Image: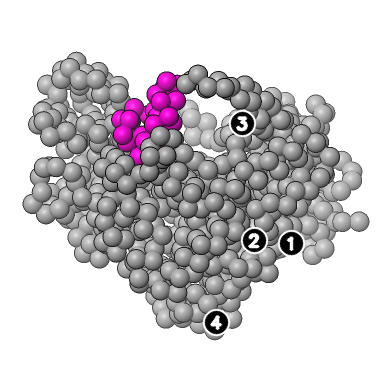
Amino acid sequence: MLKILFLDTETRARLDISVGTDRYTRAAECRIVTYTFVTGPAKIWLPYCQPIPQDLKDALDDPEFLILAHNAAFDRLILARALKLVTPISRWRCTMAAASAHGLPGSLEALGRVCMLTEDEGKLTEDKGLIHTFCVPQPATGEFIEPEDKPEEWARFCAYAIRDTEALRAIFNRMPAVNYAGVNLRSWMLDQLVNERGFGFDRALATAASDFLDRAREASRKVMRENTENQIGSATQAKRLLAYIRNRYDIDIESLRAGDVRDYLESDDLDPILRTVLEERLEAGKSAGTKFKRGLVLAGPEDRIRHWCRWSGAGRTGRHAARGYQPHNMARPAITVRRPAGHKRAGRIELDPVKASTIDDVIIPGIYSKAALNNPLIYGGPFEAVTIAVRHGIIAAQGNELVVADFKNVETVITAWVAGETSVLNAFRDLFDNPKDKSKDPYRIIAGRMLGKPPEEVNESERQMGKVCILAFGFGGGVAALVNMAIAYQMDLEPLAFVVLPSATPEQLEKADRAWQRAFLTGEDFELSREVYMACDIMKQSFRTANPAINQMRYDLNTAILEAVADKNGTVYNVARCQVWCNASFLVIQLPSGRRLLYASPILKQEEVEDPLGGRAWKSRYVTYLTVRGRSWRRERAWSGLFVENIVQAIANDVLRAAMLRVHDDTLTVPAIKAYLDTLEPYARTAICLHVHDEIGLDVPKGSYSEARFLSIIKKLEPWMGGLPIAADLWTYERYGKR
C-alpha cells in the first residue's frame, strides 16, 4: 500500500504573510502540526510544548513515505526552518498544485465543494477567524494571544486544524492525477527548486526609484493643483478629476483610462492646460513604483526574491502565474513610447524601442540623480522612466551573469503546427534559418501590409502590430479580438482604412460592409468608423483565406467538442493533433504531450440568433462549463476560439516545461555551474532563476554556459513534437535586459 503522510501546519509570526513565503517562513514559529495517514484518525502535535510524536517522526524519517500538503512549499519550509525537520522535495506532493494542473479551484475550501465532500468531511469554515486570534499579534498590544488566555477558542482552533488535514486526505482521494504525474510532476519539482533559487533584486535601484517617485508624486500634485484651480489635489483622484474636466472644458471624455486619455491627447487643438492635466493623469497611472516598493518588501537573504511563481497557476493551460513581484507583467521597453529629440507634441508620436544601453546609460543614472523628470529622451517623465527600468531591477548574483533564451513566435508556430498549415510552418522555418532577413518575418510582413511599407522597413514596435493581428485572428477572433489587442498594445487602427480598403476586392468590401452594418445595429462596432471597421474585417477575411487549414481546424475542433459533449459516451475524436472526448464529469482535450485540459461539468446549449439585417435566423450550439475565476467557481460559456487558444497556450507551456527540464539537467553537468550551485542551500540548486512567459533565464558564473550550448538544448525536440519548428533569441547580461 502507498505510504502517505498528510500534513498541515499553523504558524505565527510578527511579520505579516504579505512579506511572502520566503521571508515569512524564516521568521515564523510553528504552533500546530496536524497529520494523518492513508487510514486512521488525524492527530495533532503542539511543537511549542510537546516532543515530536514517534509515528510522525518515523514517517518523516522514512524515505518511502510521501508527504502531502496543500500549498506544500509553505509547510515544507516551516518544517525545515521552524522545526529543523528537513525533507527532500522529491518526497512532497501538493494538492493545490494538483488542483491547478486540472483547472480546479486552488483553495482547500472551494476544492472540497468541487470534490463534493460531505459536511462532516469538509473544512470547518466557521472557525477560520481563529487564525487571526492566535496567529497574528494583537493590534492594541502587539503581543500574541496564548492558548491559556482563551482555552475554549484554542480547543476549537485545534479542531479546525485537525479537520483541515482530514479534508486534505478526502480531497486527495477524489482528485484527478493525470496532470500531476510523470514529466509534469518532475516539472513541479523543478519549479520548487526555481522558487527557492529566486532571482536577484537590485535593492539600491529600487530604493532610489521609490524615493524618486515619492518626489515626483509631490511635484505632480503641485502641477495638478496649479492647473485645476486648486480643485484637484492628485492626478490619481480619477472620479473628481473626470467631473472637473467635463465641467470646466465642456467635453464628453468617456473615462480617464489610459486609452481614452491617449485618444484626447492626439487632438491638435486641445487646450494647453487640459493637455498638461491629461498628460499628468497618464503618467500618474503607471504603477512601476509600486512594483519596486513591493520588491523591497519581498527581497530576502542575498537580496533575492524567492517563491515568486505558482506552478500551473494560470489555470487549465498549465501556464505559470507570478505572485508578489510578478515579473510576468513587467512593461517591455521594446514598445515604450518615446518622444523624439526636440519634438514637443506636434502630430503623432513615433514608436521607438528603448534599448538596454539607453536604460543603463541614461534612465538608471537619471533615477539615481533625480534628473529623469527633465530628461528629453524620456517621454512622460519620471513614472515612465521607472516603468522602463523595472526589468533591469532583476540582476544576476555577484560574479554571475543572466543567460536568457526566449522562444521565437512560439504561439503562432504552434497554431500552424496543430492545424497543419504547411505554408506558415515553412515560412517560419525559412525565417529561423535566416533570422537576420527581416523580409521573411511573418509579423513584419503583416505589419508592412497594414502600414503600407516593405517588411524590412518595419521597426520593432510596428512589428508588434503584425503579431497582434496574427494572434487575434489565429485563435478565430474577429474585429473584437483585434480591437482588444490593439488597446493592450497601444496600436492605432485608423491607418488601416487608408492602406487596406483600396486594395480590397469587391467581395471583401461587400462582406465587410455587411459585417459593419450588423455590428452597428447591435451596438458592437466599438465606435469605430465604418471604414476602419471594414478594414479590420477585411484583415480578418484575408487572414482566413491565406490560412485555410487554421480556419478549418477551428471548425473541426468545435464540431468534435459539440459532438463529444452531446454524447458524453467517451467517443474519441482526433483533431488538431489532440484527442477529444467527454464523460459525465469532464470534457477532455488530451494534448500531444499526453497532458489533459479538463472542462468540468460541460453542458451543451442552443440558442436562436436573429440576423439584424433581416436575414434568416440560425441556431447556435455552444458549451458551458465550470471554471475558476478568482476565488469563485462559476459556469462560463465557451466558443471555438477559446478552445484553440487553450490548446496553443497549453502546448507552448509543455514546450517550455520540457526545455526547462533539459536545461536544468544539462547545466548540472557543467563543472563551473555545479561547483557554484553546491555553495547554495540544497533545495535551491538549479541554474534556472527565472522564466517569464516563453523565456528561460539562468543565473550562472560568467562565461560558464555559452549561448550556443543553451540554444542546442532548447532546440531539441521531445518525441511528441515531431515537425515543430523551434527557435529562440538569446542574450547574456548582468541585468534582465536584452542587449
Query: Which quadrant holds residue 718?
Result: bottom right
Return the residue at label 1: 182
Mark 3 → mark 2, Cα distance in angstroms: 31 Å
Local crowd size for mark 1, using a 10 Å CA cut-off: few (<14), some (14–19), many (≥20): few
Q: Earlier in the sequence, mark 4 or mark 1?
A: 1
Residue in view at x 33 percent, y 52 percent: 449
Asked if residue 140 shows in the view, the reply is yes
Is residue 683 placed above or below 269 in the rendered structure? below
Return the residue at label 4: 670
Amino acid type at mark 4: Val
Rendered image: mark on residue 187: 2
Secondary structure under the numbered disc 2 in the rendered image: helix
Residue 498 as seen in the image, left or right of residue 103:
left
**Residue 585 position within the rendered picture, expressed as x and y whole percent measured from the top left:** 78, 37
* Residue farthest to the bottom, as pictured: 671
Residue in view at x 55 percent, y 62 percent: 422
Mark 2 → mark 1, Cα distance in angstroms: 9 Å
Mark 4 → mark 3, Cα distance in angstroms: 50 Å
Local crowd size for mark 4, using a 10 Å CA cut-off: few (<14), some (14–19), many (≥20): few
Mark 2 → mark 4, Cα distance in angstroms: 21 Å
Secondary structure under the numbered disc 4 in the rendered image: loop
Q: In this orientation, which residue lies closer to the viewer: 178 or 147?
A: 178
Q: Are marks 2 and 4 in contact (CB under 8 Å)?
A: no
